[in-house]
Amino acid sequence: MSVLGIVAEYDPFHNGHLHHLRSSISSVSPSVVLTVISGPFRQRGTPSLLSPFSRAECAMAAGADAVFALPVLWTLRDAEHYALGAVSLLSSLGATHIAFGAETADLQLLQKTADLLESPPPLLQKSLHSALEAGIGYPAALAGAAHICVPEAGTLLRHPNNILAVCYLRAIRRLSLPLIPIMIPRIGEYISDCIVPEAPSASSVSEALRRGDWTNALAALPPFSRRIVQSDFLSGSVPDHKKLDVLLLEKLHSMSPDKAANLPDCAEGLDKALLKYAARSSSRDELISCLTTRRYASARISRLCAHALLDITKKDISEARLPDRALLLAMKKNLPLTGSWKNGSIQVLTAAKWLKSADPADLAAWRIWSLCCGKTDAWAFEKKLITNC
């Protein structure tokens, strides 16, 4: 049977997500739709606005058959490794197809770019090295180096959804997976500070909700997502960034230089700057602003802060295995199981069983997310597996 896999965050689930999910289902006509979402922390290093269970409920209402959480050691990574962990997990769960969005509606060019980056010619490697030495950040340096080799590839890599799409294709090639890629053209323009109801960015909707701009934010959500978002806000089930500020700055104020130097992706000198500016900053946003430079993008600094908060080390990242267990958040009743579930090649666990053997970083992520909501450590797991959608 055909099994469609989708990687997403759905934080919150908006009209653009609905278009992508329904278009993907229409393109494949799958027997089963599996979705892998980020857990309590997003790929860019911030706590999710809504709990993974709330986002899973939205995915189910939109047409997913089962929803799983990606482990935090693969969520809090650059696009290349985030995609690697998510694609590996989907394949292990039995996916035969993977659908993703992109600004460039040319799967052949996306694949050509992925092949270029997976088998980089000497010219690309030399250009990338020179750009990095000149202090250019990695994403821009890579796009510039690719442009020298294949001009249209360099242009393509300057758009966020294209980058992720290329990373999914790279993961498929690197892991030699039989996944069939399905590209869904992104509708509208990605403008983070402007809400376009038909095709908004999740960050713009999230920020609008936080500042109380409910009219514009809710207009960008389908009815089922609107209901869940309103319920979570009214019940106080969203994280307070002021609590996050306190937890992060306290952690950094007490962190030793050796521990800071052992944070993942913490280049020489960045560890010292992190502790220096943590002592002078009154919030997470202020700290990130102080450390963001041409070389170090804000997303990288944000992930660095999340690593510090969750006690994730370079060793944790380097030794992280591709996901061999899956935290199941939601599943429709009478769902036909894929072969990988039946033969035990991957463990599919509900929260109660997952808690007993979860990675320390995952437990820390769920605990801190709950604390930022003003709840107890175990509160995030009080919501049971969603099966009634």
Image (cartoon, helix red, strand yellow):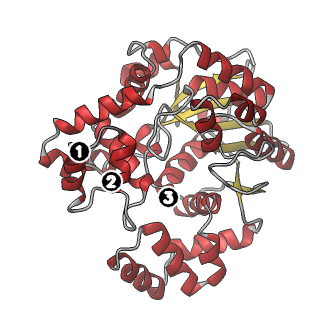
Can you see residue 174?
yes
Q: Is residue 107 left or right of residue 142?
A: right
Q: Amino acid at mark 1?
A: Arg
Q: 105 above or below 152? A: above
Q: Amino acid at mark 2?
A: Cys
For the N terminus, the image quarter is top right
Q: Is residue 246 left or right of residue 71?
A: left
Residue 275 spot, x, y in % from top left: 20, 47
Q: Nearer the viewer, residue 219 or 329?
A: 219
Mark identifier at residue 80:
3
Mark identifier at residue 362:
none
Q: Nearer the viewer, residue 209 or 21?
A: 209
Residue 140 spot, x, y in % from top left: 49, 71
**Mark 2 or mark 3, which has the lower sequence index?**
3
Q: Nearer the viewer, mark 3 or mark 1?
A: 1
Q: 287 above or below 310? A: below
**Mark 2 or mark 1, which has the lower sequence index?**
1
Residue 333 spot, x, y in % from top left: 73, 18
- Mark 3–mark 1 Cα distance, whole angstroms, equals 33 Å
For mark 1, give the secondary structure. Answer: loop
Q: Amino acid at mark 3?
A: Glu
For the C terminus, the image quarter is top right
Q: Nearer the viewer, residue 260 or 29?
A: 260
Mark identifier at residue 290:
2
The answer to whether the residue labelled 2 contacts the one labelled 3, judged by CB atoms less than 8 Å apart, is no
Residue 281 spot, x, y in % from top left: 28, 42
- Mark 2–mark 3 Cα distance, whole angstroms, equals 26 Å
The answer to whether the residue labelled 2 contacts the one labelled 1, judged by CB atoms less than 8 Å apart, is yes
Q: Which residue is mark 1?
A: 280
Q: Quadrant of residue 72?
A: top left
Q: 33 above or below 154? A: above
